[in-house]
Each structure stands twice: as C-alpha cells, then as structure tokens.
C-alpha cells in the first residue's frame, strides 16, 4: 500500500509540476474568492451568560424531611418558556438598543421573532443553563443577553415564590377544614358521653363478669336448696313411726338377748343336771315368760303401726317424746325448714338480678358501637389534622426559603461580557483559509485526477498490469525554447502569486483600519 | 529572411537534379549548409566495399556535422549532451538491445500506440545512441510514409526518400541514403507523402532493400521509424520485416488498454519492450522516501 501511495504521490508531484499553470491560476482564483467572501462576511458577536439553576443548596440537607424545596424538572424548556414569553420580550424591545428599530407593532413582532431565532439556550452539566445571543452589534448582543438573564432570574424566582405561597395557602385552608371537622366530632362524643354516662370502656366485661358470677350463685343456691330438702325429709322420717319401731325393736332385742342368755345358762346346767333340776325348771319358766312378753310386744307394735297408718298421724311413743334425741330432731327440722325458705327467696332475687344484667349488657353493646364509631372518626380526623399541621409548617419554611431567595438558587455563574472579537468565521480565518484552501483544492484536484485518470503514468502499471518489460524511461526533452517559455511562464505565475499576496496585504490593512 | 528565401529558391531549382540536400529553415547553420550543398552528396563511396572495420568507419564521408549546440537545440543526443539523464537512458536502451541480439546487428522498429504520435525523434535518438559507439554505425529509415518527420526533426529537406525508391526503379539505395549530420548515422527519409504504403512494404523490393542494407556492414544497425501501430496497417506489415519492435509509450497519454492492443498487434516474440517517454522531469524537491 505504501509503495503504491508513494507512487501516487510522486506522480502527483510530477503532475503538479507539469500543470503548475493550472495550479497557480486555481490557487489565485480560490484565494482571492475566499478573500472577497471574507471582506463581505457579516460579523457576528456572541454574548452569553451562564446561569446556575440549583435546586439543591446548603439548606436542603439541613431541612431534610422538613421542608420541601421546589424543584424544576426541565430547566432549559422552562428557561425558554420564560424568556420567550411576551413579558420578557417586550421588556427587551423596550431597551435603548432595540428601541430605534421598533417603528411599529408589525416591525416589533418581526424583531421579536428575529431575536428568538438568535437566542440559544443550552444546558451545561446538571444545573447550568447557558443563554447565548448572536448579533451583528456587540453592544446590542451584550445588552440583550444581560437583560434576558436578569429578567429570567427575576421571573423565575417570583414564580417560585408564588408557587410556594400557593402551596402554603392551600395547606393552610386544609388545616382549617380539618380543625372544624375535628371539633364537630369531639362535640358529638361529648354529647354521647353525657347521654350515656355509664357507658365507658371495659363496662361490658364487668357486666359479663357479673352475669357469670350471678349464674354461679344461682347454681350454688339451687344446690343448697336441694340439700336442705333432703335434710328436711330425713329428719321428718326420723321423727315418724318408723323411728319408733326402731326403738321398740330394741325392746324386742332386749327380750331376745335375755332369752338367749337364759338359754345359755340352761344349756350349761344341763351338762351337769337333769331337766328336772330346780334351776333348770326355773330358767325354763323364765324363758317361756319372756317369750310371751316378746310376743306381746310384737303384737303391740303391729297394732300401733296399723292404727297409725289408719289415722295418718305419727305415732310417737310417750317414752320417745320425752327423749332428748327426739327434741333435738324436732328443732333441727324447724331450722331446716327456715333455711329452705330463705334459700328459695335468695334464688328468686338472684334470677331477677341476672335478668337485669342481661338487659343492661344489650344496652351497653349498642352504646359502645356508637361510641367506637365516634371515637374512630375522631382519631382519623385528628391524625390528618396533625399531619396537615406539620405540612403547613413545612410549607411555611419553604415559602420563607423562597422569599429569602434561599430555596431556589438562580445564580449568574458567568456574567455577560461585551464581546470584543466576533464569533464564528472572522476575517483572519478567511485570510488564513484562502491560501491554504487554494493550495489544497488545486493540488487535491490534481491528486484526484491522477488517481482516477486511467492513462499510464507509471512504468509499474505497465509492468504489473501488462507484464510487458519497460526497457527504459526517457525524460522529456527540454530545448532552449522550452526553457525560455518555462521561464517566462514562471515569471508570469510568480507575478500572479505576488499580485495575490499584495491584494491580500492591501485588503487586510484596509480591513484592520476599518475601511471595509 | 531574404537570405533564406534565396536559399529555398536555389534548392527548388536544384531539386530537379535529385540527389542534392536542401535546407528549409532559417538557422545559423543553414547559410553554411546552402553554400556547402555540393558536399552533401549521398554517400556512394562505400557501396561496393562490403567491409566492416572501424578504420573504414572512420573513413566514412560524414559530410557536414552538427555542432553539439545544434544537436542540443534539435533534441538529439550526443556524447556531451547537457541532459545526461536522457543520454544515459538511450545508452541503457542500446545496451539492452545489443544484449538481446547477442552482438549481431539487427533491424529494430520503433512504433507507438497513440494516434498521431510521432516517433521520429525517438528513432533518430536511438540510432544516435548506437552511433555514439565508434565501432558501430546506424541507419534510420522513416517508414511513416503518411506523416514523414525526419525533415522536421532535423530541419533539413530531403529531396528523395522511400517512396521515390519504390516508385522509380532507377533510383538506388545510394540515391536515397543521406548523411544525417550526426557521426556514423545515416538516414533514409520517407520521401513524398503517401496515404498508404502497404504495397511497397509487402513487395520483394522492400525485403531486398532490407537485406542489402543489413548485409552491407555487419556493424550497422537499422532502425525503422514506423507509424503508430494502432491505426496503421503498414506498420503491422513492417513487423514481419524487422527483428525487434520497441513501443514508444508517452507518459500520461495512453491507457493500458491501448498499450495492450498495440502489444497484441506486434506479437510477443517481436516486442522487445516499452520505451516510456516524455516523462516529465521531476522537480527538484528532494522528498525523502519518494523515488
């Protein structure tokens, strides 16, 4: 590739030499044309101002979570909207630098559009906004951009203040509304309380405890009543005939045991004596007597029972009536009866109380539902009210921040300067570009020509493409007349170049003296 | 200028005699030449002797020779050429041709692949290069009958040439062979301009002429200046007569396609190679790395 390029380069140099006339003429034409353009090229002065729109300042970390600083999202769009607004545009046109040009409203509108076209607003980095204005007049460019920046900042800060004031007002109104609601709910609760004084929290458990206690008492009383009944019955039974029989049976027992004793004696005597022995005879007699006695007693009891059964009365043997046991039983019976009556009365009372408690519990349930409803309402309202109060304080701080020009920093990072040098293409650029471009274009054209012209200029092409040997390379003859012509041409070409240079110098001097 | 006109008139009158050299342009030497006109006789002194010694070459009647300055102004090389690069190029070419022929003398045709391109000067310079060597002589024949160029190249009007030789059986080779003004270089001009010469070149007479010229001196090298092969049937015929062909390719004027066409017309066995001519001298920028 390199050797190919070298070849191309050397051919280009050769061709440049051969076609030096063309090159010089092209060079002169192009550089003079560029010079001409340079002299008529309009000057453009650019004034710019760099504004820092910083939503995070020193106060923000201090007030974290307390105050909300107002934030703007798209700063460039925002700035554009503000600057291109009628208000600022009118202010700019009212400036001295523009005043003269605004002859009527139509012209004013046209100039406004013109100014809008010449303004460029760009964002630099995170928070920097650059406002640029291009104009043919340096002072006017400076004044305009300066005015724009100042009005923009003023307007921007005012709008932020308005915004935070509006936010504060809104929250403040909300606070008032909620306060009213809260007071209303409080009144409701107070009224309910005064109407239902015994309704208090925990009352329902108390009542239910009482109910269960009453129920237990009633059960106990029932048990005691049954106990007393059984006791009464048994005492009564003891006092009835069956008790006497028991006692008389004990008389019969006495008889029987005496008989048995006597018979034991008879048996013992019979071991030694005959039945005719006097003692035995006497004992036998005694036994028979006792047996009669026993028999009599049994008969007596039978009649007593049957008679008592017939009369329904309790037959009480006289001997028993006077016994202390009987007396005691009697008193027991009467005390048991008294107790029985007391227990029954108590049970009735307890049942009544239970009923009361039941009805009270039902009442409490209804009241408690109402109360909890009211309380819940109160709680919610109070929460919101508290929150709003906090928010209102935040908003107040935010508002103060904006009013103190602290919350939303519009800072002029780089103030506008009067542009001394025109921006963009200056005359100096044209002076420099003219000869360079002239040379580059003419040589470039030759280079392109050599590259795309298919005519053979190198022995390498013949050798490589056609495989025909090249015997020799012979330079062009230069006889005396050619040399002479070449010299004349060189003088003419040199003259042309000097002429161009002179024009360049002349025009440059004129330009810097301010004649053009 | 009146002197020149006088000279021209004189020449015209004497042209009836046929074998006298005439001068057409007004240069310093013309006066001298016109006065010396008688001395420019076709050389017939060597015709009968088929010898080839250096001594005899030295004895050749050279007529009036060009001075070095005149050769320079005519763009013809000489041993003290101011343009040594061109001189060396032709010497190099000579060496290559001699090397190729193994020392034998030969007939070389110089042609081009560009219409209207004149190889006359190139042919004469090539012949001059051979004649620089004191042991060699050269003969250059203008076979471009349609566009003769030797008189222009050398600023001399040659009264008779190839066409006369072919058309008139009375005219011998001696009548058409001239001293060129360059040492050891003879030439045969084209003669009267002819649109086509195929019948001449295909004739037996042409072959005989070639044999005669080549055989007369073993150290004579013959050069044919032919019309561009691209648009001339004559040249294609001449290819058969000559031993070698060299193709003159001027710098920056022909495409490879044209060269290819010409090379194909010549044929591989005859085409010795290409002379890449009219290369513009590189300006004196000594840029390193650029050959």
Image: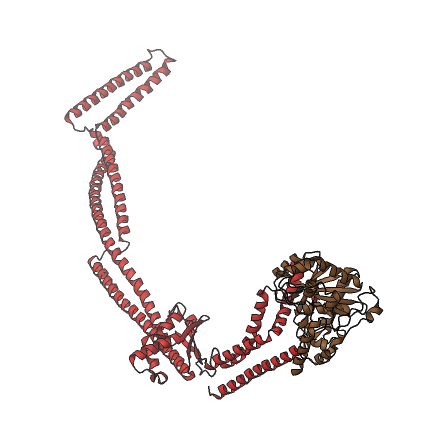
Chain colours: A red, B brown
Q: Nearer the viewer, residue A191 or A115?
A: A115
Residue for point 41% across, 73% down:
A121
* B14 horizontally vs A328: left or right: right
Q: Position of residue B123 (x, y in %)?
A: 70, 67
* Residue located farthest toward the left when viewing the structure as drawn: A311
Residue A315 pos. (x, y %): 18, 28
Q: Is residue B177 left or right of residue A389?
A: right
Residue B155 x/y as whole percent: 68, 74
B24 vs A68, left or right, is right
Q: Can residue B63 be seen in this snapshot?
A: yes
How many marks can you see? 0
Residue A52 locus on image (x, y percent): 43, 75
Q: Is residue A216 left or right of residue A304?
A: right
Quadrant occupied by the C terminus of chain B: bottom right
Placement of A349 over or under B30, stated as above or below: above
Q: Quadrant of residue A339?
A: top left
The one of B143 and B288 positioned closer to us in this rendering:
B143
From the viewer's perspective, is residue B138 above or below residue A119? above
Q: Give the quarter of the image for residue A231.
A: top left
Front in this rendered view, residue B129 or A139: B129
Q: Is residue B65 visible?
A: no
Give residue A411's quadrant in the image: bottom left
Give the residue at x 57% y 81%.
A497
Quarter the N terminus of chain B occupies: bottom right
């Amino acid at each position: 590739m390199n050797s190919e390029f070298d070849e191309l380069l050397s051919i280009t140099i050769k061709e440049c030499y051969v076609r030096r006339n063309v090159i010089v003429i092209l060079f002169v034409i192009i550089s003079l044309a560029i010079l001409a353009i340079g002299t008529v090229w309009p000057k453009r002065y650019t004034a710019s101002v760099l504004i820092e729109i910083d939503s995070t300042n020193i106060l923000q970390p201090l007030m974290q979570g307390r105050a909300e600083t107002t934030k703007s999202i798209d700063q460039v769009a925002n700035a554009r909207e503000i600057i291109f607004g009628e208000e600022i545009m009118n202010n700019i046109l009212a400036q001295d630098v523009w005043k003269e040009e605004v002859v009527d409203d139509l012209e004013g509108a046209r100039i406004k559009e013109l100014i809008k076209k010449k303004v460029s607003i760009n964002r630099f980095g995170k928070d920097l906004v650059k406002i640029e204005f291009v104009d043919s007049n340096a002072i006017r460019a400076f004044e305009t951009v300066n005015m724009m920046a100042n009005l923009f900042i003023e307007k921007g800060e005012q709008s932020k203040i308005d915004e935070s004031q509006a936010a504060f007002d809104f929250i403040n109104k909300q606070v008032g509304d909620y306060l009213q609601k809260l007071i209303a709910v409080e009144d409701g609760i107070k009224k309910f309380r005064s109407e239902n004084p015994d309704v208090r929290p925990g009352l329902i458990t108390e009542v239910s405890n009482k109910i269960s206690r009453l129920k237990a008492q009633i059960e106990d009383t029932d048990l005691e009543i049954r106990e007393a009944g059984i006791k009464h019955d048994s005492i009564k039974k003891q006092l009835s005939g069956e008790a006497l029989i028991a006692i008389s049976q004990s008389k019969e027992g006495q008889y029987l045991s005496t008989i048995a004793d006597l018979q034991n004696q008879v048996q013992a005597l019979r071991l030694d004596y005959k039945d005719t022995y006097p003692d035995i005879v006497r004992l036998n007699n005694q036994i028979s007597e006792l047996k009669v006695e026993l028999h009599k007693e049994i008969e007596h009891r039978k009649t007593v029972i049957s008679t008592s059964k017939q009369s329904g009365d309790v037959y009480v043997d006289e001997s028993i009536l006077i016994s202390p046991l009987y007396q005691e039983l009697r008193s027991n019976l009467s005390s048991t009866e008294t107790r029985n009556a007391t227990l029954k009365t108590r049970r009735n009372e307890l049942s009544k109380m239970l009923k009361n408690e039941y009805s009270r519990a039902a009442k409490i349930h209804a009241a408690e539902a109402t109360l909890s409803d009211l309380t819940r309402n109160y709680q919610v309202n109070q929460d919101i009210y508290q929150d709003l109060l906090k928010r209102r304080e935040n908003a107040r701080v935010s508002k103060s921040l904006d009013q103190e020009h602290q919350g939303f920093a519009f800072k002029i990072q780089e103030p506008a300067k009067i542009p001394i040098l025109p921006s963009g293409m200056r005359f100096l650029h044209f002076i420099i570009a003219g000869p360079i471009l002239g040379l580059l274009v003419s040589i470039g054209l030759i280079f392109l020509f050599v590259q795309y012209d298919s005519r053979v200029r190198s022995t390498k092409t013949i050798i490589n493409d056609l495989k025909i040997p090249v015997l020799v390379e012979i330079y062009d003859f230069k006889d005396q007349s050619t040399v002479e012509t070449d010299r004349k041409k060189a003088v003419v070409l040199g003259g042309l170049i000097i002429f161009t240079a002179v024009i360049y110098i002349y025009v440059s001097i004129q330009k810097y003296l301010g004649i053009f | 200028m009146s002197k020149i006109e006088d000279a021209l008139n004189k020449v015209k009158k004497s042209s009836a005699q046929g074998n006298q050299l005439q001068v057409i342009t007004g240069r310093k030497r013309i006066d001298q030449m016109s006065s010396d006109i008688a001395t420019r006789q076709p050389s017939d002194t060597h015709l009968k002797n088929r010898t080839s010694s250096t001594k005899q070459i030295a004895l050749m009647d050279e007529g009036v020779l060009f001075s070095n300055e005149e050769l320079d102004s005519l763009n013809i090389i000489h041993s003290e050429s101011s343009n040594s690069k061109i001189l060396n190029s032709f010497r190099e070419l000579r060496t290559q041709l001699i090397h190729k022929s193994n020392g034998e003398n030969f007939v070389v045709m110089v042609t081009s692949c560009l219409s209207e391109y004149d190889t006359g000067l190139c042919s004469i310079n090539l012949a001059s290069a051979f004649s620089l060597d004191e042991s060699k002589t050269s003969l250059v024949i203008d076979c471009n009958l349609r566009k003769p160029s030797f008189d222009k190249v050398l600023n001399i009007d040659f009264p008779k040439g190839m066409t006369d030789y072919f058309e008139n059986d009375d005219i011998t080779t001696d009548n058409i062979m001239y001293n060129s003004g360059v040492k050891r270089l003879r030439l045969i001009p084209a003669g009267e301009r002819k649109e086509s010469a195929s019948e001449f070149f295909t004739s037996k007479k042409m072959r005989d002429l070639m044999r005669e010229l080549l055989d007369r001196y073993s150290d004579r090298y013959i050069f044919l200046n032919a019309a561009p092969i691209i648009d001339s049937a004559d040249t294609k015929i001449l290819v058969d007569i000559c031993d070698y062909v060299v193709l003159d390719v001027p710098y920056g004027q022909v495409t490879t396609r044209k060269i290819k066409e010409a090379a194909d017309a010549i044929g591989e066995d005859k085409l010795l190679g290409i002379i890449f001519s009219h290369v513009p001298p590189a300006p004196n920028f000594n840029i390193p790395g650029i050959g």
